[in-house]
Image (cartoon, helix red, strand yellow):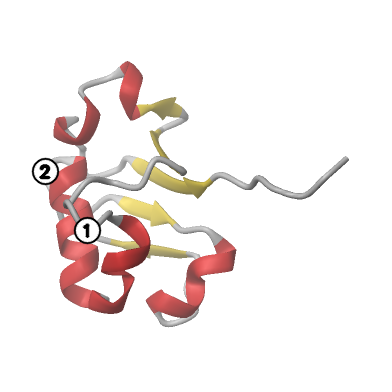
């Protein structure tokens, strides 16, 4: 079962975990299974149109899914999936 690393700032929505195992054959499956377990996370990950919010970056074993097959990227049992929230804002 793939391991998902989750942003520490959002661990409140996933029972205060920053890493956990999730079933899924693709990234889309993994995200769906995370939302089945933690439905309050839905509006934080997805727009009202059902698109992954643009400030989330997802990596499999250090490779961004945009360089693979996007949400349809196949995930293997021992893969490490990192969901990273971009940080921005403030004035310099």
Q: Residue at x 24, y 60 (%)?
A: 22
Query: Observer-nearest residue: 61 or 45?
Result: 45
Q: Whole-percent x and y of residue 24?
A: 14, 51
- Residue that label 2 marks: 25
Q: In this view, does 17 lie above or below 70?
A: below
Q: Where is residue 14 in the image (x, y as percent from the top left)?
A: 39, 75
Query: Quadrant of residue 41 in the image?
Result: bottom left
- Dot 1: few (<14), some (14–19), or many (≥20) neighbours within 10 Å? few
User: Relative to residue 19, is residue 11 depicted above or below?
Assistant: below
* Picture coordinates of residue 53, whole percent (x, y): 35, 47
- Image quadrant containing the C terminus: top right
Q: Which quadrant, please, contains the N terminus?
A: bottom left
Whichever of callouts 2 and 1 sits on the residue coming sooner in the sequence is 2
Q: In which quarter of the image is residue 28?
A: top left
Relative to 51, 11 lies left or right:
right
* Camera-side residue of 41 and 51: 51
- The residue to which callout 1 is attached is 48
Q: Where 21 sits versus 89, above or below?
A: below
């Amino acid at each position: 079962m793939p391991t998902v690393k989750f942003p520490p700032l959002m661990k409140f929505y996933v029972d205060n975990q920053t890493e956990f195992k999730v079933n899924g054959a693709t990234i889309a499956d993994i995200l769906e299974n995370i939302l089945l377990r933690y439905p309050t996370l839905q509006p934080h990950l997805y727009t009202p149109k059902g698109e992954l919010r643009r400030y989330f970056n997802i990596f499999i074993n250090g490779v961004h899914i945009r360089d693979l097959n996007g949400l349809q990227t196949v995930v293997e049992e021992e893969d490490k999936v990192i969901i990273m929230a971009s940080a921005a804002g403030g004035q310099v």
